[in-house]
Structures are given as structure tokens and as C-alpha cells.
Image: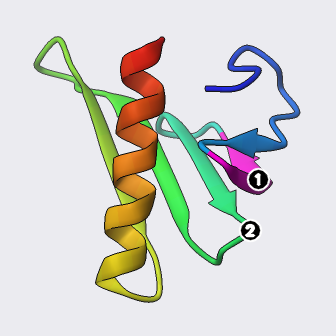
Amino acid sequence: MEAASARELTQFSGFGVLRREDLDGIKLYLDNGAWLLVRPSGTEPLLRIYAEAASEANVREVLTRAEHTIRKL
């Protein structure tokens, strides 16, 4: 995550970040119209990654890029 500790995150995985929420993990509203939620599992030692976008192809692109970025951390 670029600038992962910064409150003002402007880029993530090559997408611009329009807005961020910290209610149940970190939810990012992206400049391609999609959103991405990354949160720790409450029952297992893992991160859960959720996304919503206008098409399945866009969701897969967001999830793939997010996973790649997170694995590099």
C-alpha cells in the first residue's frame, strides 16, 4: 500500500483514492468507480479483501492489484 500509514492516501495499487473510511477495516473509494475494503478476519489470522465495481472484470482487476500490493508489504 503506498503510504499505508498516512491518513491521506491518494493512490493504492495504481488507482487514485477519492475517499477513505475506517469503520470495519479500511474502505477505499477508487477513481475508477469501484470500492475496496481490506479488513482483518475476526476468527482467522488473515486479511479479507472485498471489492465492488461496475463489472466483474473491474472487480477482478481491483482485487488482483490489491492482493499483489498487500503481498509485497
Q: Main secondary structure of the magenta part?
A: strand
Q: Is residue 33 magenta?
A: no
Q: Earlier in the sequence, mark 1 or mark 2?
A: 1
Instruction: State yes or no: discs 1 and 2 in contact (Cβ < 8 Å).
Output: yes
Q: Nearer the viewer, residue 44 or 66?
A: 66
Query: Residue 32: percent from the left, percent from the top?
Result: 66, 74
Which residue is labeled 2 in the image? 31
Residue 51 position by quadrant: bottom left
| Residue drawn at point x = 76 percent, y = 53 percent | 17
Q: Residues within 10 Å of mark 1 (few under 14, many from 20)?
A: some
For mark 2, does the 10 Å Cα neighbourhood hold few (<14), some (14 to 19), or many (20 or more) residues? some
Query: Residue 35 vs residue 61: left or right?
Result: right
Which image quadrant for residue 29? bottom right
Marking on residue 17: 1
Compared to 39, does 55 lie above or below? below
Residue 73, horizontal then vertical, whole percent: 48, 11
Please, is residue 33 above or below residue 66 in the view? below
Count of numbered badges drawn on the protein = 2
Q: Secondary structure at mark 1?
A: strand
Mark 2 belongs to which amino acid? Asp
Name the residue type under label 1.
Answer: Val
Residue ID at (66%, 41%): 12
Residue 61 in the figure: left or right of residue 22: left
Q: Which contiguous range is marked in magenta?
A: 14-21
| Residue at position x 61%, y 26% in the image | 1
Please give the label number shown on residue 32.
Answer: none
